[in-house]
Amino acid sequence: MNITHIYSDADGQSHYENLEMKCSDQGPLGSMSEPIPVTSFIFRENPPGYEYGWHNAPREQYIVMLEGMVEITVSDGEVRTFVPGDIVLVSDTTGKGHASRSPDGKARKSLFLPI
């Protein structure tokens, strides 16, 4: 299972990297990763047409896309679009951060899992 990681380097610039979450066969239950502790979970709804300028993640957290789309730009200039089913680990809590917006002008629903 692959997820996207947004992180800050030593110079405060944010970047993307792809991470593979290792899963092992659990028989009839399917393949599972090792448990990842989370502190809570947060449901989030963004209004149609949202656009958030440069900001840092308030905490290290996973974002699970449930409905809608988000386009995220990191400070090195790379832009990616995420759709339902995508998982993003944001850990750019310092530095320039990232910018996000609705690429299709519609609302978005997501689940935040702080770690």
Image (tube, rainbow, N blue to C red):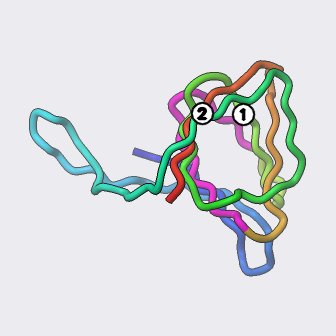
Give the percent coordinates (x, y) of residue 109. Answer: 63, 27
In terms of depth relative to the viewer, which is nearer, 21 or 50? Answer: 50
Cα separation between marks 2 and 1: 10 Å
Check disc 2 and report the residue beneath it.
110
Q: Which mark is residue 70?
A: 1
Closer-to-camera residue (73/62): 62
Q: Residue furthest left?
A: 27
Q: Vertically, is 10 above or below 28?
A: below
Q: Is residue 44 left or right of residue 46?
A: left
| Vertical order, 51 against 15 (above or below) | above
Q: Is residue 26 left or right of residue 103?
A: left
Q: Position of residue 80 (x, y in %)?
A: 71, 42
Membership of 60 in magenta stretch: no
Residue at 84% in and 30% down: 50
Residue 59, x across and y down, in percent: 64, 61
Tell me the residue at 82%/35% (across/down). 101
Query: Mark 2 falls on what kind of element?
Result: strand
Mark 2, other Cα within 10 Å: few <14 / some 14–19 / many ≥20: many
- Quarter of the rendering containing residue 72: top right
Q: What stretch of residues is rendered in magenta?
A: 80-93
Amino acid type at circle 1 is Val
**Residue type at tag 2:** Ser
